[in-house]
Image (cartoon, rainbow, N blue to C red):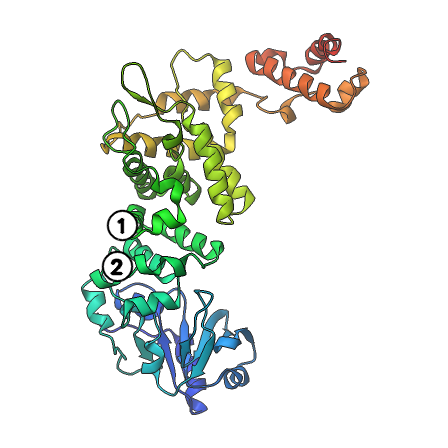
Amino acid sequence: MGKFTIHPILQEIASIFIRHGKQVFLVGGAVRDLLRGHQAKDWDLATDALPYEVIALFPRVIPTGIKHGTVTVHFKGRSLEVTTYRTESGYHDGRRPDQVTYTARIEEDLSRRDFTMNAIALPLPRGPLVDPFNGIADIKGKIIRAVGNPQERFAEDGLRPLRAVRFASQMGFEVEEATLDAIPQALGTTEKVSPERIRDELEKILASPQPSRAFLLMEKTGLLELLLPELACCRNIEQKGFHRFDVLDHSLLACDAAARDQAPGLVRTAALLHDIGKPLTRVRDAAGVWTFYQHEQVSAALSQDLLTRLRYPNAVIEGIVHLIREHMFHYEPTWSEGAVRRFIIRVGKENLDNLYQLRRADAYATTGQELPRDFLLPLITRVDEVLAKSRALSLKDLPVSGKDLIALGIKPGPPMGIILSALLEAVVEDPALNTKEKLLNIAENLKEQYP
């Protein structure tokens, strides 16, 4: 919590405000991060200057949130949100204030912030920190505490409960008891928040060092059942065989493993959701053992609905759902070279590394014990060998096309698609067939079957 250096651009901006008789403070997460010894990523400023006065001070200002006193200043390649000191009232949409009142004191502005660690202001270009809610002490103690009455803070903004648990997983802090206890009463407000904002917070949780910290707090407070009911249903779904954990704890452990291994967000999301179909597919067999046949297909379908509900981009949804659908592969050394090629085609060359990472996370989460160093190595070696010498793993790799089939008298439409797929399958089984002459001969023979 020692001294820290103020960036020269911030000093220059501060000099412009001061030259015109205005105060300016660095506020929010930037101050928190500086106090934790981290580099501040985003610079948010608070000032007693009114929005139109800020606009007059700088050549490039965008009125991004001028209704609420916020403008965005573009200065020497940086974008800074600048907000006039304000108090707020009325939050009918569960997110934004209905009324904003400008105030003259930074302390009043800080009183509307979410958590004490975010309610500290650093005067620019220099001066003692303004910390009316003992946020510095809470940062030292690694505590997330609401400013003032937590029920009031959460009633103002339904995203704040999710931010509290997100900060816990990002920074390894503990949510103070009264703050945590206020979350269940705020679920009605959280329910009003747009799916896009919920998605953004979930993505930040998944990018944290230990996502399970947030998801377990979400479960404890009711946020999980509200926002991710498909995942919440996995609690107390016991599993068979070597599994040490129920489906929820297994899924959270897999997600943590993917985060620990620096897997992409796509893989971490797939790890979190890969087994959400198990509650719907669980059946006890004749020996009294729980089975989950085809759970990967149900998990994929449920995940598609969930991610669509949260407004994920279609391409991201397709990537995650594909990994979940394919995560139950079972490699055997007896696989033929054709079987390996079919595996590559089904998964997609571009998805192999992600699927390997998902499978490692899934396997680790079975017992929570580290995997052998050569886990999946036999399969990866076989795949690499096939990739090195295979020339046809998709239709575009074939030396014949639809135009060639038309020349044989095959009409465009479903029959042509069937014949092209049959040609690819033939080449997958026997790469020596991948010549134009041989494939046209096969197509000629198939033409009579699919007129």
**Measured along the vertical axis of the image, is residue 433 above or below residue 229?**
above
How far across and down, in percent of the image, does residue 42 sit? Answer: 41, 66
Q: Report helix, strand or loop for mark 1.
A: helix
In front of the other: 80 or 151: 151
Q: Quadrant of residue 445?
A: top right
Residue at point 28%, 80% (across, down)? 130
| Numbered circle sitting on residue 220 | 1
Task: Mark 2 and mark 1 in contact? Answer it, CB < 8 Å.
Answer: yes
Badge 1: how crowded within 10 Å, few (<14), some, or many (20+)? Answer: some
Q: Quadrant of residue 109?
A: bottom left
The residue furthest bottom is 21
Residue holding disc 2: 180
- Do we see residue 206 in this rendering? no
Is residue 119 rendered to the left or right of residue 11? left
Residue drawn at the location 30% of the way across and 14% of the way down: 286
Is residue 121 visible to us here? yes
Check disc 1 and give the amino acid type. Lys
Q: Position of residue 139 (x, y in %)?
A: 23, 66
Mark positioned earlier in the residue sequence (2 or 1)? 2
- What element does badge 2 sit on? helix
38 on left or right of 99: left
